[in-house]
Amino acid sequence: MNAPSSKAPPALISLGDPKATQVPEAVLDAPGGFAWWYVDTVDANGNGAVVIWSWGLPFLPGYLSGARAGDGDPARARPSLNLAVYRNRKRAFYLLQEYLPEAASMDGAGNFHFGDTRMSRPQEDRVRIDFDAEVPGSGARLQGTLEVEGPPAHLAGSTPSADLAHRWTPVLGPSRAKGVLTVGSERFEIDGPAYHDRNEGTHRFDDLGIDHWSWGRLVTPERTAIWYLCYAKDGPPVAWGAELLADGAVRVQEMEAILEAPRKGAFGLRTWRRVELREAGSSEPWLEAEVGARVDDGPFYARTVVNVVAGSQRGMGLAEWIVPDRIDLGRHRPLVRMAVHDLRGSNSFWLPLFSGPSRGRMARLLRRRA
């Protein structure tokens, strides 16, 4: 498939080439542009982690609002690192850290640094993350290693797009993640099926014509099955069913999506209890997902666990739900700042309550107050 087709505006989403490891300068130079690398893993018990390293993460306070006003920073001026760790379908650790531009770099070959944390690609089929980061209010550092191993992704029957508005690029096929992370006496062991991709774009995330966005996946040794839904503000949605096969081959086809039983979270963000994808004209589902607990919730973003059936495969995965027009609104910004450790300047008094291990949050806050 040449993605996307004329059925929907190309700006909603396009497919990138996994062999292209260098981020275009146009992305990094664009005010409101974005480039992020995403790794997740979750086991059958809901234990796992999500790591995102980025330039121009849309969720950073003041980033999109500055671009909307016409005086925003380019993506390269806003590097950040995000780690969330889960135990039994609940968040056990969280860190979203923003760095000075000179404190982050990439070499185009899969090697990065964000402060003292390093990401490397020692082999084509492996990504290694060595964590070493301050945890605000804890008096301790996040340290440890996470390795993700899987076949390098390559396109099979799909053509990469030159459109830079919003491009999704898978990096590895069906993978496995293993690691140990520590923060003081807190220890997190990670071992589960894993997923790794990249998103990049020259447009503001809220200027892509997307009303709401949903993404989710299931990883088994045989394949990774992914749904990718971009519902347009004006026009038909883009609904993709993507497969990453055991040899790393990427196959993408347009689907028909069915969302059932909407529900709202504590901040009013809507998700659905059930997602189904079907091939055009088929009465049989290509993928079915039952949406479970929210492990992260906010006014513009939610992350949920999902139980997925894709053909003969079934298991637990993760899903994301985003409403771009709600990102970085003034009424939400103070709440978002509470969860962002900004190494460039001042931070919210409430930061220890939202950053670091979930255990002991109140004690860390009270120590800061004292």
Image: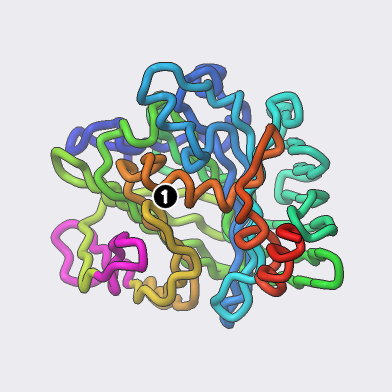
* Residue 55 at x, y percent in the picture: 59, 33
* Residue 279 at x, y percent in the picture: 23, 59
Q: Is residue 153 above or below residue 269?
A: above
What residue is shown at x 48% (from left), y 20% (from top)?
30
* Residue 26 at x, y percent in the picture: 50, 17
Q: Quadrant of the N terminus?
A: top left
Relative to the observer, which residue lies in front, 361 or 58? 361
Q: On the image, which quarter does residue 42 sit in?
A: bottom right
- The residue tagged 1 is 251
Binning the other alpha carbons within 10 Å of mark 1 as few (below 14), some (14 to 19) or many (20 upward) gives some
Residue 67 is one of the magenta-drawn residues: no
Q: Amino acid at mark 1?
A: Arg
* Residue 264 at x, y percent in the picture: 28, 67
Q: Is residue 130 visible?
A: no
What residue is shown at x 73% (from left), y 31% (from top)?
104
Residue range corresponding to the magenta coloring: 263-288
Q: Is residue 145 above or below residue 205?
A: below
Q: Secondary structure at mark 1?
A: strand
Q: Quadrant of the C terminus?
A: bottom right
Figure disc tally: 1
Does residue 348 appear left or right of residue 239 in this picture? right
Residue 284 is one of the magenta-drawn residues: yes
Relative to the observer, which residue lies in front, 331 or 312? 331
